[in-house]
Amino acid sequence: MAENDIEIEGLEREGSGLSETKLSFKEPLLRSRTNQTSQIAIVGANVCPIESLDYEIVENDLFKQDWRSRKKVEIFQYVVLKWTLALLIGLCTGLVGFFNNIAVENIAGFKLLLTNNLMLQEKYFQAFTAYVGWNLVLAAAAAVLCAYIAPAAAGSGIPEVKAYLNGIDAHSILAPTTLFVKIFGSILGVAGGFVVGKEGPMVHTGSCIASLLGQGGSRKYHLTWKWLRYFKNDRDRRDLITCGAAAGVAAAFRAPVGGVLFALEEAASWWRSALLWRTFFTTAVVAVVLRSFMGICKGGKCGLFGEGGLIMFDVNSTKAAYSTADLLAVIFLGVIGGVLGSLYNFFVDKVLRAYSIINERGPTFKILLVLTISILTSCCSYGLPWLSQCTPCPPYLGDQCPTVGRSGNYKNFQCAPNHYNDLASLFFNTNDDAIRNLFSSSEKEFHLSTLLVFFVAIYFLGIITYGIAVPSGLFIPVILAGASYGRLVGTFVGSVSDLDTGLFALLGAASFLGGTMRMTVSLCIILLELTNNLLMLPLMMLVLLISKTVADCFNKGVYDQILVLKGLPYMEAHAEPYMRNLVASDVVSGPLITFSGVEKVGNIMHALKITMHNGFPVIDEPPFSDAPELCGLVLRSHLLVLLKGKRFSKRRVTTGSQIMRMFKAHDFAKAGLGKGIKLEDLDITEEEMEMYVDLHPITNASPYTVVETMSLAKAAILFRELGLRHLLVVPKTPGRPPIVGILTRHDFMPEHVLGLYPHFATRSQK
Amino acid sequence: MAENDIEIEGLEREGSGLSETKLSFKEPLLRSRTNQTSQIAIVGANVCPIESLDYEIVENDLFKQDWRSRKKVEIFQYVVLKWTLALLIGLCTGLVGFFNNIAVENIAGFKLLLTNNLMLQEKYFQAFTAYVGWNLVLAAAAAVLCAYIAPAAAGSGIPEVKAYLNGIDAHSILAPTTLFVKIFGSILGVAGGFVVGKEGPMVHTGSCIASLLGQGGSRKYHLTWKWLRYFKNDRDRRDLITCGAAAGVAAAFRAPVGGVLFALEEAASWWRSALLWRTFFTTAVVAVVLRSFMGICKGGKCGLFGEGGLIMFDVNSTKAAYSTADLLAVIFLGVIGGVLGSLYNFFVDKVLRAYSIINERGPTFKILLVLTISILTSCCSYGLPWLSQCTPCPPYLGDQCPTVGRSGNYKNFQCAPNHYNDLASLFFNTNDDAIRNLFSSSEKEFHLSTLLVFFVAIYFLGIITYGIAVPSGLFIPVILAGASYGRLVGTFVGSVSDLDTGLFALLGAASFLGGTMRMTVSLCIILLELTNNLLMLPLMMLVLLISKTVADCFNKGVYDQILVLKGLPYMEAHAEPYMRNLVASDVVSGPLITFSGVEKVGNIMHALKITMHNGFPVIDEPPFSDAPELCGLVLRSHLLVLLKGKRFSKRRVTTGSQIMRMFKAHDFAKAGLGKGIKLEDLDITEEEMEMYVDLHPITNASPYTVVETMSLAKAAILFRELGLRHLLVVPKTPGRPPIVGILTRHDFMPEHVLGLYPHFATRSQK
């Protein structure tokens, strides 16, 4: 249809108030359309089938019966269990976070010690070999885990969790193997010297733990407690996984409030104040667990695990008043930080596209890519410090400088005794220690050239590392690059501004985080909790606001970019402008298959076989009603359970009461993705195919509906706000079949809509 | 209808899947029902008419035309203006907050100095008279302002703002006079020695400022800029007022992040992440404004305004590890704090009910009540310190103790030189200073008896003060009572726990706040920002969790209680359980008035006259359609504008295109409550009454609809999540009129539903 037609039609409709002619003309076309958007997406580094989650309460007769018969004690059990699960999620995530830290500190510490000792004996080549070798072994282990066991564990995991909480389910996202690989892959990757963080993976780990605990009553483990049936729905799982994501951030940064806000601002798509309350509890548990275990480890009982294992930086900002020059410097920092942050996103996008070509060729190629990056990173971190001159140790540090025979700052590297290599303090260290050094307030610790070399190297290493088949968080690379950038600026403007350079490093990190991730309040709180100093709040807010605003002019946040790249059909909270020019019936895709209230088994089997639809409208016809009318919606998974029960009848009569006696509501509870009854599990005889089954007991009699002339924008908002999976479109005029079509998540995707109406795409670009 | 009938009907329906008989039987009954819930509510201390706000986009032809013709530059203007308004809200609220502080510190400081000087001369009775006199004058001024100029300014204001953000509008809530009285009444009330805070009033003030700025383009001031028309809708106003509420908290506590979280957790009913971003900007502006002005005031240039004018308490908690005894003490504190907090709510409720009888009798009675409470408070704060013994000044304080000739701690009161009265340090001081003293870490500053007397007095003074006709925040009374309770407990358990008593006071305040207000994350952040110490986060979280949980067993949060008491129809985010047993058509109230697509002017005038409905369904009938069909919904305010334009036609034809040429979309923009065209403003002749007007251009053609058999719970969730004002109920079966009824906010109120089906009330009590 040409663009002009639409325009004229629009005007006609406005003039006459009648759209009837247009609609009846369109309908035959409509029925033959199918949705072209993909039902699969890249999860981690591999392609997976995806499904939508369903947050609507299925109000069928069975639910109502069950709901009425619920006793007070069952409701109490439910509440207690939900809190218990929140507690368990907090405990487990806290433990994993602590274990992760101990493991990384010990493995990386041992590696650095070994290399350091060899260097002290001036065996520089052996030291290099040992260093690269260790890193390669660790990288290979991580890559093998990731490539062969759980490809979904690659990458940050935050985009996947975000997608899950938006209602997109892929079995592999939160599977137990993913959890396993995420934990160990992340430890190996971070300890292996990659420029990756453990924060994204911790969020994913927390969500996996929540998902596993929430599915506790699985058939596989024969744990089907009566009260666990309440959790067999997507709403409760969503709540638990939100708690898990918050717990992940809390464990990674030791930032409980930051975790809650991260879940709210970045992860969750739906939020209730009850959830605030529950995530807060979970992160509080994480904070307590971490605190207790750090207390236990205090006396050096945990190997090389030191005080700073869990990040807690000390930034000095005793200055309470800022001069105009300070503010100008900070604004400058924010603007450039925003530009560099959005550039970071741009490069990450390009690199991911390039890597996906390599990763597609199979696990071997994935591992080779990982090894290449590992060697490159090792070469940088061992090689670049040689460029730097040696600095004499400041006398007031005494024994602390240079660091000999233990992991720490002020690396001796190739220098003479009582000298240290400032670039090695950054490169030849764990990422956490490097950040601590950058944030430290000693004025003259780093040369300008050191900071510049480190900044450029880390900026590009961070970009090329994300996307390899290793669990890799984005926070730490961005903080590292941002902090070195900030310290660089701070050293530059040191003559006009008398703010501390460590504070500049912190603000630089904030500007980079704002520029890439586009979060505000949660980043602010996380950074404040990391540095334990509320006095720099106004400056931090200013920098975050500026860098986010600047970066928003260029591109989307890095997680949103990755979502698009992976093909995950993320529903935005707002409707796209062109949707106001379309109505609901413009985008429904066919063919539509409906069932009668009492339907022949053969028809149902046929429909289930030929389509992959997950919801079918049920229409009551005479003699069960005066005229065809919409009875409701029945879900594929419920149909399968009903058919498996084989409560069929020879004649076309309602047998609802028998079915109600045979089934309980929790028989229809949602199993994990891929775990429910499959069509192949059914064994229906030829004779049974000719029999009838009453669908009324399992039909959701209150599905949300929109009239076909409802604007697509408003339908999208309804769909998104209520977290629906199916939205029924009913006709406006009487005398037509009682249902026009079903809208699903894919029908609202820009690819689908703009595929049908390409002129909107060109127009919106104008 | 007896309870049994429902049960049997329910079972029948389940059995047969048919509900037709029931519906057709019910319908005649339905039409004659009217909604009994009140359209008025108590705002402040007086009764006001209330209206619902409408967050739905009215997608009529005019809107669509306007929307299509919007240029890029206009969208840019809109965005810039919205950010500018957020900036202005932050600036103004920050300024008001600062002015408020200076005024209170100076007035109260002068009063205390005067009394103190008289006492130093041992003129105790004169001092008493001066003290009581000053307080009475200030109280009378506040009460007169409140009783005569803006009764809506009485009380905290947070419940009203919360109601507004839930979609309930009463003109007086955010009127300019309310703003004026709120600012000055709050200053007078706080300076007048009442046990009230300025935090609630600051939230209300911020919201009023936001509302005024958002309405900037009012006809009254002849400021109708073209771009301001975009703000003439409830959605944009809601956003601005959310920013205002956040700015209020930020200004009151100097807690920018706390302000954002307060808006999110307590104030706002709808939240988008874009809003997080905007509120964050607003509160950042407030923080910067406060900081700059405090910098200006540093050198004593602002009279008695000292360092601590804006609360920023210093609590000492260097201890990083807690023993089991510490934790047990803290848990004990939390539990009792929760009980006392919920008891506080209980008493506030009773007192409010008693006061409303007095307040109803007229302004004079209101003022008398205020004066009585003022005298009582003055007597307590002047009289009770006499009970306390004098304590010798600790020698290390030197000049600081006793405080002579200036406002400060260590009041000399009636004591000999070099002695101070510890109870006077609490009572005979501003509330902020009293809190600072309670939070201070000196071990032996307060006797046990002192704390006990202060706690009991403040607990009950706080309860009897809320509800008088003075702007009165609840935060400070609760913090005062909680801090003294916490210090009391801390002094008691001093032998087993070695936590600081100042820390105990802080935790006590947290437990009381959690017990009365039932917020969690926002309180936590506000307290952390107040005390600038993140190390006590885990303990604070623990206390808040415990006290909220304990208090939730007894009653609702204090703001929710006040909402109920005031009769504001607040829509909860979740549906009540009994709503699952009802369907949409069960509660719609009649009589329903509908219009034709082209309607006779006289009919419209008649309908507008006889009902106060704000929305009317428009039904297209032959010859405009084949059969009667629902065209959409038209709003009362739009009808009035259309009728005022007098674009009528003699015959029954569509004249949409003419109307479209005559009107612009912004002619129909929503004016402030009470500011739009009224029915009396119309001057329609007898002849015109017989003419026709085409309603299509102003009919919202995409109203949200539900089928009559939709369960009421799901309809309520739809209504609440999308922020609707009208929800159309359409019939399920063909061949009936195309609309069954309209659901509005009042139809979902428990009073209405349980009034129609009283047996659910009795059942839910079981």
Image (spheres, coloured by chain):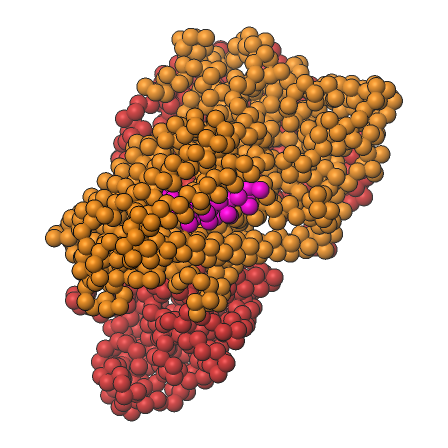
Chain colours: A red, B orange
Residue drawn at the location 53% of the way across and 73% of the way down: A324
Residue drawn where x is 33% and y is 69% of the image: A314
Asked where in the image residue A230 lies, by quadrant, the reply is: top left
Query: Residue A766's image quarter?
Result: bottom right
Residue A204, percent across and down?
A: 38, 53
Q: Is residue A700 visible?
A: no
Q: Quadrant of the N terminus of chain A?
A: top right
Residue under the image location 24 percent in, 50 percent down:
B423
Residue B201 drawn in magenta: yes
Q: Nearer the viewer, residue B539 or A260?
A: B539
Query: Is residue B16 found left or right of B347 in the rendered image?
Result: right
Q: Position of residue B66 (x, y in %)?
A: 75, 43
Query: Which residue occupies the extreme left position in the image?
Result: B495
Query: Who is closer to the viewer here, B147 or B474?
Result: B147
Q: Could you say where residue A746 lies in the image, as x and y percent from the top left?
A: 57, 42
Q: Which residue is located at x 34 percent, y 42 percent?
A: B377
The magenta segment is B177-204
Q: How many marks?
A: 0
Give above or below for B732 relative to B232.
above
